[in-house]
Amino acid sequence: MAHERFSIRQYMILGLVALCAPLGDACLSRGMNGLPGISILHPMSLIGAVFTPWVALGIALLIGFFACYLTALSWADLSYVLPATAFGNVIVELLSRFCLHETVSPQRWLGVFLITIGVGFVANGPSLTEHPADEAAKPDAIFAEKEPV
Amino acid sequence: MMMLAPAAQPPFWIATAMISAVVLTSTTGEVLTAAAMKSIGDLDEIRARSGMKGAIRAVVTCPLFFAGVGFLALAFFALLLALRFLPLSLVAPASASLTLVTNAIAAKIFLKENVGRRRWVSAVLVCVGVYFLTY
């Protein structure tokens, strides 16, 4: 398993994956809660909701999340990206405690602690599995095969 | 306004089947999307070589990507269905935390990722943490 250090840009992409999804969900929730009741007999009212500021911001953030998520999956393993980006839950919890002054129960603090430890575990490990076919495709590997023993 | 009547809590096995449907479709979608992105290659390099249009073209011409997005859409509808019959406080933590573990298993089996002890410990810690945060 190879372990190449990420560039700052790649860390930023992982950070955006972690941040954009919970923030997008929060914006959608705030936008939808502020709207009058939507009836299933009038689905066009849902289309109108898309153009309200909070819902539009939420959709933009979720599109940004998906673009960053796809980019991260192109250079890191799925089993690395998912736990590493769960840190977004911790950031939302800290924002709700210190910016919105909400009460965070001890059970939630325990959740924050466990996620932080879990993210620390995976972030210090290798990010990408190198398969033998990938190794063989590398110029160094081809050179090593040709070298006499 | 047409209102939907609140549904009675279904039996245990139906609740299990609903949450399993969310977890399975979500995991299938994530694995297919990850496989698509691995087959395409490093998007940053493609963007540097062929620009943003080239990177978008590489993604939207990959059939695996659409299969993955299709399953993720199915997972969304399975979640909506589950929320129609089950409380949010059960569906959200159960599906969010179980998906982390099933993804690690599926990544090892289907994507041949090297899921070592470090990643297993991390997946379980994050899974329990997410459960505590959302329950």
Image (cartoon, coloured by chain):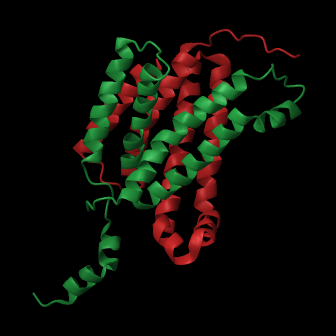
Give the chain letter for red. B
Q: Is residue A54 left or right of residue B62?
A: right
Image quarter for residue B85? top right
Quadrant where the image shows the N terminus of chain B? top right
Q: Nearer the viewer, residue B111 or B58?
A: B58
Which residue is rendered at x = 50% and y = 73% of the image? B48
Residue appearing at x 30%, y 26% in the figure: A113
Which residue appears at 29% of the width and 44% of the height? Answer: A122
- Residue B13 in view (yes/no): no
Residue A134: % across, % down: 34, 71
Using the rendered view, name the quadrant where residue A41 is placed.
Answer: top right
What color does chain A have in the rendering?
green
Residue B14 percent location from the top left of the image:
59, 20
Instruction: Determine whether B53 is above or below B117 in the image.
Output: below
Q: Can residue A27 be seen here?
A: yes
Q: Answer left or right for B57 relative to A138.
A: right
Q: Name the residue at 63% across, 24% down.
A: B82
**Residue B10: % across, % down:** 62, 13
Q: Is A148 left, or right, of B68 in this rendering?
A: left
